[in-house]
Every structure is written in structure tokens, then in C-alpha cells.
């Protein structure tokens, strides 16, 4: 009798699960394969339990790990497996990653283009303020003094050349165009078309640059020889708007502006995609500006040479006036001078 009861007990332990229990177990197993709202079909198992499913109590059925045994093949085979690897947009994770990286690079590049365009605008505003200082302050004040008979008005006109025309071009045309474009940047992210349209007007700088050396010499001579001229200039230079800089320094700014355009435009083209709608206009603009910049660079070199000559003139105690546009510093450095009598060597510093 006891043996019979023991056999019945063992049969009860080995009895199959009820249909309800089998359904719940299969649901639990399938639910464990839900990842981020998507079902991983590659780990689906048969609905019927295996021998391993019967081990343990019902209380820990939810924590059981999936069987590593063979699984039923999926319908569609490789096609279904490929779908598992695809994202929601029908793209593989690698393609999505590459697309995100490309998008990030594109956004970064667009930000760089915007930064260059914004720098062009900000420097243009500052430049127009300097042009106003030269045209409306220095030029006008010196003309007023000239009309009093202190010195010839013609000399003042030679010093400032066509600065009024340059000021009018930048303040009434180029600067307003740039300001308008930056306000519309989200819909029209380009500056090449503006520069291509207005770059030909930069040819007017040729006259200013050509007479720059002579203008600097006139300022120097007028300041030394005519007290009224010197007084007007020094009075303006004391004003806050001058930033503690001399008239000569401000006169150099129009010469330096063209090379500045060239530098910004080159940087803009390096960041601009070759298939951009702005490419051709920006390229043509650079060609025109580079031609004008070559003349400005030559004037800048002459200006730097004059500054160096002025430094040497001051070092020598201003005994001999060597500051002249026709003079050029070729070389400087220490030399040894040999005495004719005792052949002793003496150190000297030579300016050639």
C-alpha cells in the first residue's frame, strides 16, 4: 500500500502542466524577449513545456532563464533575420550611426559658415565706424581749418583721397546688405552673391592705395611744419573715439580691409560644400578681391617699412631724416670693423 502511494505521488510530481499553466508559461517566456518595445523573434520557443520547465515551483517560473536548446525555425528565414537587424526607419544600426555622424558634421559645418558670415558683419560695422572717423571727423575738421586760410585745402584732399566715396559705399550699400542677409540667414544661408555683386566696387580702393605713401608723407610734413594742422589732429586723437591711436594708424585701415575680406572669404570657401548654390558666387568674389588685395598688401609692406625707418630715426637721435617713402630698409645687423692701424676689431651695428 505504501509503495502504491509513493508511486502515485511520483506520478503527481511528473504530471504535465494544465493547459492554462502552459499558456501562462509560454507568455512569460515570450515577454522576457521584449526589448525596447520590439519582440526578438530569434529567441521564440515552442508553446509546449520541456522537461526543464517542470523543474521548480510555479512561484519562480517568471525568473527562469530561456532554454538554450534548439529553437523552431522562423518563417521567412534570412529575410526575417535581416528585419530584426533593421531599425524603425528600415535602416541598419550601422547606417543609422553613419547618418547621424554625417548629420552632426553637416550641422557643425553650417555653424562654421554662419560664424564666418557673422564675423564679416561685425568687422564691417567696426570698419564703417573707422571710415566715419576718417571722413566725418578728421577730414571735415581739417577742411574747416584749411578754409580759415591756415593751410591749403588741396593738401587735405590729397591726404584723404577718395575716403568719402569709400565710406559711402560701405555705409550705404555693403553693410546694409550684410545686415539684412544675417537676419534672413535661416532661409538664405549665403554671402557669396552679395560679395560677387558688390566686389567690383572695391576697385575704388586703387586710388586710395596708390596715393597712400604720398598721403603719409604729407601728414608727417604738415604735422612738423604747420602748428594749426598739428593742433587739429592732436585734439581729435585725444577723443575716446580714436582709441588712443594716431591719424596714420586709422588711415592704414582701408588698406588693411581688402586683405581681411580675402582671408575671410578663403575660410568661407574651405567650409562651403562644392555643390553649394553659393559656391560659384563666392569663388568669383574671391578672384576679384584677391586682385585688389595684392595692391593693398604692397602698400602695407611699404607702411611697415616706413614704421621701421621711423624707429631707426628715433634710435639715431633724430639727427638725420631717413624717413622717406623712397627709402627702403634692406638689412640690419652687427658687424666687425677692422682698424687700419692695429687691425683690431670693433663691433658696430649697421643699417643698410
Image: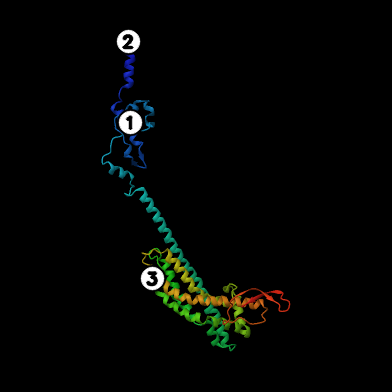
* Residue 79, position as x, y percentages in the image: 28, 44
Indicate the secondary structure of the residue bearing disc 1: helix
- Image side of residue 120 versus residue 241, left or right: left
Q: Which mark is residue 281?
A: 3
| Position of the C terminus by quadrant | bottom right
**What is the distance, in whole Å, between disc 1 and disc 3 at their CAs?**
70 Å
Q: Specify the quadrant of the image occupied by residue 345.
A: bottom right
Q: Classify 10 Å Cα crowding around label 1: few (below 14), some (14-19), many (20 and above).
A: many
x then y, percent, for residue 337:
68, 76
Are the residues at dot 2 and dot 1 in contact (C-beta closer than 8 Å)?
no
Residue 172 placement (x, y as % from top left):
45, 76
* SS for dot 3: helix
Residue 174 appears in the picture as rendered: yes
Name the residue furthest left. 76
Viewer-side residue, 9 vs 20: 9
Instruction: Quickly name the residue at label 1.
Output: 25
Regarding residue 254, the answer to whether it shows in the image is no
Residue 206 horizontal/vertical position (percent): 47, 80
Q: What secondary structure is marked by label 2?
A: loop
Question: Horizontal placement of 178 versus 240: left or right?
Answer: left
Residue 24 found in image quarter: top left
- What whole-number distance in Å separates the C-alpha atoms at marks 2 and 1? 36 Å
Give the CA separation, mark 3 to mark 2.
105 Å
> Eyeballing the image, is 117 above or below 134?
above
What label sits on residue 1 in the rendered view?
Answer: 2
Residue beneath the point at 34% across and 36% down: 31
Amino acid at each position: 500500500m505504501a509503495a502504491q502511494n509513493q508511486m502515485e505521488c511520483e506520478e503527481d510530481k511528473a504530471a504535465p502542466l494544465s493547459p492554462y499553466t502552459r499558456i501562462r508559461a509560454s507568455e512569460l517566456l515570450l515577454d522576457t524577449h521584449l526589448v525596447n518595445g520590439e519582440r526578438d523573434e530569434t529567441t521564440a520557443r515552442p508553446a509546449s513545456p520541456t522537461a526543464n520547465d517542470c523543474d521548480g515551483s510555479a512561484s519562480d517560473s517568471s525568473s527562469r532563464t530561456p532554454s538554450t536548446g534548439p529553437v523552431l525555425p522562423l518563417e521567412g528565414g534570412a529575410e526575417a533575420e535581416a528585419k530584426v537587424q533593421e531599425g524603425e526607419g528600415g535602416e541598419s544600426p550601422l547606417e543609422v550611426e553613419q547618418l547621424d555622424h554625417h548629420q552632426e558634421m553637416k550641422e557643425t559645418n553650417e555653424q562654421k559658415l554662419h560664424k564666418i558670415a557673422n564675423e564679416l558683419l561685425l568687422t564691417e560695422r567696426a570698419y564703417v565706424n573707422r571710415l566715419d572717423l576718417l571722413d566725418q571727423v578728421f577730414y571735415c575738421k581739417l577742411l574747416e581749418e584749411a578754409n580759415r586760410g591756415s593751410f591749403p585745402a588741396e593738401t587735405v584732399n590729397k591726404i584723404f583721397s577718395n575716403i568719402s566715396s569709400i565710406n559711402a559705399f560701405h555705409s550705404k550699400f555693403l553693410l546694409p546688405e550684410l545686415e539684412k542677409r544675417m537676419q534672413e540667414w535661416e532661409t538664405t544661408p549665403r554671402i557669396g552673391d552679395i560679395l560677387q555683386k558688390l566686389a567690383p566696387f572695391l576697385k575704388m580702393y586703387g586710388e586710395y592705395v596708390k596715393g597712400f605713401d604720398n598721403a603719409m608723407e604729407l601728414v608727417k610734413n604738415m604735422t612738423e611744419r604747420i602748428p594749426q594742422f598739428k593742433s587739429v589732429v592732436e585734439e581729435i586723437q585725444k577723443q575716446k573715439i580714436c582709441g588712443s591711436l594716431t591719424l596714420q594708424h586709422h588711415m592704414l585701415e582701408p588698406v588693411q580691409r581688402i586683405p581681411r575680406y580675402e582671408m575671410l572669404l578663403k575660410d568661407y570657401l574651405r567650409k562651403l560644400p562644392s555643390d553649394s548654390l553659393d559656391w560659384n558666387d563666392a569663388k568669383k568674389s574671391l578672384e576679384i578681391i584677391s586682385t585688389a588685395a595684392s595692391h593693398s598688401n604692397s602698400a602695407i609692406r611699404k607702411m611697415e617699412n616706413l614704421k621701421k625707418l621711423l624707429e631707426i630715426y628715433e634710435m639715431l637721435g633724430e639727427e638725420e631724416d631717413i624717413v622717406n617713402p623712397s627709402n627702403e630698409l634692406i638689412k640690419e645687423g652687427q658687424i666687425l670693423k677692422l682698424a687700419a692701424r692695429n687691425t683690431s676689431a670693433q663691433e658696430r651695428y649697421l643699417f643698410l
